């Protein structure tokens, strides 16, 4: 699908599913992978160039970043899914109204949460697990990343809409531009200018501003499948509701990650030390690299499933889901095996501190035991989101992190100490997979019954 001209969106209902999934997922995976590699390299810069305290302080900021991402994805993911469904149903004007309303919502929400974080920054960081040692680097990073949060949300939200409207290659370049620029200028700000963790935040702000400018340029082009035009910016209750109820599930995933990070950090402080907080940040960095690939596959699947759902082609949407789930599971399985086999190698990429390395190795040996099932969970959540089944998406979004992991973080450490924190990850993975499988089986049977009833009516 060429991105240098008006997209042929109808190909989503015509081309072979395997080819479509490759065309849409490969650019999304590359974009997500580049962003994840940037995050890893940035943390390597901080860990090796600034120190263990800095990387532990950076870990404290993860819940804040996840919370801002949750508010961004509430609009971006919901708008992308609605765009695919509306284009599949032939309603281009409706898709453009989603675009305009999404811009207004993103700006309003961004201003609100940036203001809140700026006013209550220290109390928030302490509540999220900061100590007197880590509060300094955490505060410094957040003070400089805050202005860029709105730009980051615009970049990622409208990148999703770009992909959903038939421009997977261009969406990939949106991600790559910012990540490559960040990798290039990060060392300049961190090392050459001697700005340390503050430099990492400034480099991120600049890079995301460039990416956001690129994605906004796309939507101002009249030749784009959907683009900014007059009359689409006034908020309409039905449009807003349709965006939010679909985006709520992936938004809750990020919000739940925020909540879990808070309790993980606090549990590690209660049963361990600041060095354990740094270790879990490296574990999250590694697993985020793996899940970003699976998320990219889900992003590629979403336009295919959404468009064919809107076009009344259940056979194609099921094929897309099955293939994506198989690939996602295989990737997480490979990542789990590698992490269990070579934890020292992964640790060495971030630190040469022997104490931190020992804690990382111990954590990986416990936390990765059932990580191989996470790919199935991610793709399934994306599947329900793609067909507008927000209730099921919300259940899946909450099951792993809130329904299961949160109670486990209170229970297991009391019995097993610090290892109980690490074991909360695989136990919650296993329990959430059971819930996911049950909902998927129910939904597929529902689709099959609908198809059978339609054929009998004809």
Image (cartoon, rainbow, N blue to C red):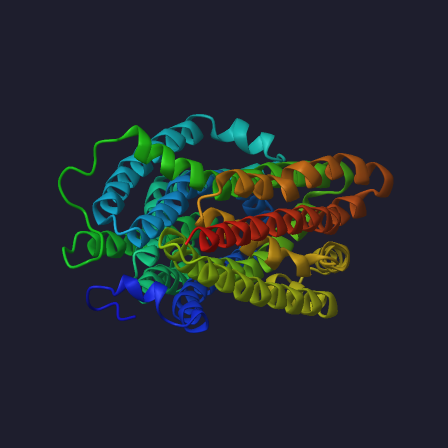
The residue most toward the right is: 415
Q: Position of residue 396 (x, y in %)?
A: 59, 44
In the image, 74 versus 419, the foreground residue is: 74
In the image, 26 versus 413, the foreground residue is: 26
Hey, which quadrant is residue 274 in on the image? top right
Hey, which quadrant is residue 149 in on the image? top left
Q: Position of residue 199 (x, y in %)?
A: 41, 51
Residue 102 to residue 423: above or below: above
In the image, 414 versus 281, the foreground residue is: 414
Q: In the rendered picture of this protein, how many numbered marks are placed on residues?
A: 0
Residue under the point 60% across and 67% down: 331
Q: Quadrant of the C terminus?
A: bottom left
Q: Position of residue 379 (x, y in %)?
A: 54, 56
**Can residue 65 be seen in this snapshot?**
no
In the image, 149 versus 55, the foreground residue is: 149
Residue under the point 50% across and 64% down: 319
Hey, which quadrant is residue 187 in on the image? bottom left
Q: In the shown orientation, is residue 393 left or right of residue 406?
A: left
Residue 183 to residue 65: above or below: below
**Can residue 84 be seen in this snapshot?**
yes
Q: In the shown orientation, is residue 240 left or right of residue 122?
A: left
Residue under the point 28% across and 42% down: 98
Q: Position of residue 74 (x, y in %)?
A: 42, 40
Q: In the shown orientation, is residue 181 left or right of residue 319?
A: left
Q: In the shown orientation, is residue 217 left or right of residue 68?
A: left
Q: Quadrant of the N terminus?
A: bottom left
Residue under the point 66% across and 40% down: 265
């Amino acid at each position: 699908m060429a991105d240098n001209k008006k997209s042929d969106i109808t190909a989503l209902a015509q081309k072979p599913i395997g080819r479509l999934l490759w065309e849409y997922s490969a650019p999304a995976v590359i974009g997500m992978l580049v962003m994840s590699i940037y995050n890893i390299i940035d943390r390597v810069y901080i860990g090796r160039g600034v120190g263990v305290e800095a990387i532990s302080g950076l870990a404290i900021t993860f819940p804040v970043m996840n919370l801002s991402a949750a508010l961004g994805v509430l609009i971006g993911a919901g708008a992308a899914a609605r765009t695919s469904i509306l284009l599949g149903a032939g309603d281009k004007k409706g898709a453009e109204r989603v675009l305009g309303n999404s811009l207004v919502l993103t700006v309003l929400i961004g201003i609100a949460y940036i203001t809140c974080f700026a006013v209550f920054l220290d109390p928030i960081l302490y509540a999220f697990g900061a100590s007197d040692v880590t509060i300094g680097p955490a505060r410094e990073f957040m003070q400089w990343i805050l202005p860029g949060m709105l730009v980051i949300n615009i970049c990622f939200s409208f990148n999703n809409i770009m992909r959903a409207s038939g421009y997977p290659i261009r969406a990939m370049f949106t991600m790559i531009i910012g990540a490559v620029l960040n990798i290039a200028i990060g060392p300049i700000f961190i090392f050459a200018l001697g700005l340390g963790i503050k430099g990492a935040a400034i480099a991120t702000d600049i890079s995301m501003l460039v990416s956001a400018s690129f994605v906004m340029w796309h939507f101002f082009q009249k030749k784009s499948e959907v683009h900014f035009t007059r009359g689409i910016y006034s908020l309409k209750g039905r449009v807003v509701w349709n965006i939010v109820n679909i985006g709520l599930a992936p938004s809750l995933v990020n919000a739940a990650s925020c909540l879990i990070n808070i309790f993980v950090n606090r549990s590690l402080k209660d049963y361990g030390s600041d060095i354990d907080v740094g270790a879990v940040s490296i574990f999250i960095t590694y697993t985020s690299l793996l899940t970003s690939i699976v998320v990219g596959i889900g992003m590629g699947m979403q336009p295919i499933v959404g468009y064919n759902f809107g076009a009344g082609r259940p056979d194609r949407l099921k094929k897309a889901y099955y293939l994506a789930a198989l690939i996602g599971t295989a990737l997480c399985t490979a990542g789990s095996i590698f992490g269990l086999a070579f934890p020292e190698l992964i640790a060495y990429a971030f630190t040469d501190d022997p104490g931190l390395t020992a804690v990382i190795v111990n954590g990986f040996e416990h936390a990765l035991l059932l990580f191989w099932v996470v790919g199935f969970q991610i793709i399934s959540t994306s599947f329900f989101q793609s067909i507008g089944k927000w209730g099921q998406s919300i259940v899946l979004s909450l099951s792993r992190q809130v329904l299961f992991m949160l109670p486990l973080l209170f229970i297991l450490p009391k019995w097993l100490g610090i290892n109980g924190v690490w074991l909360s990850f695989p136990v919650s993975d296993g329990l959430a997979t059971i819930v996911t499988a049950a909902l998927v089986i129910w939904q597929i049977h529902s689709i099959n019954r609908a198809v059978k009833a339609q054929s009998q009516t004809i």
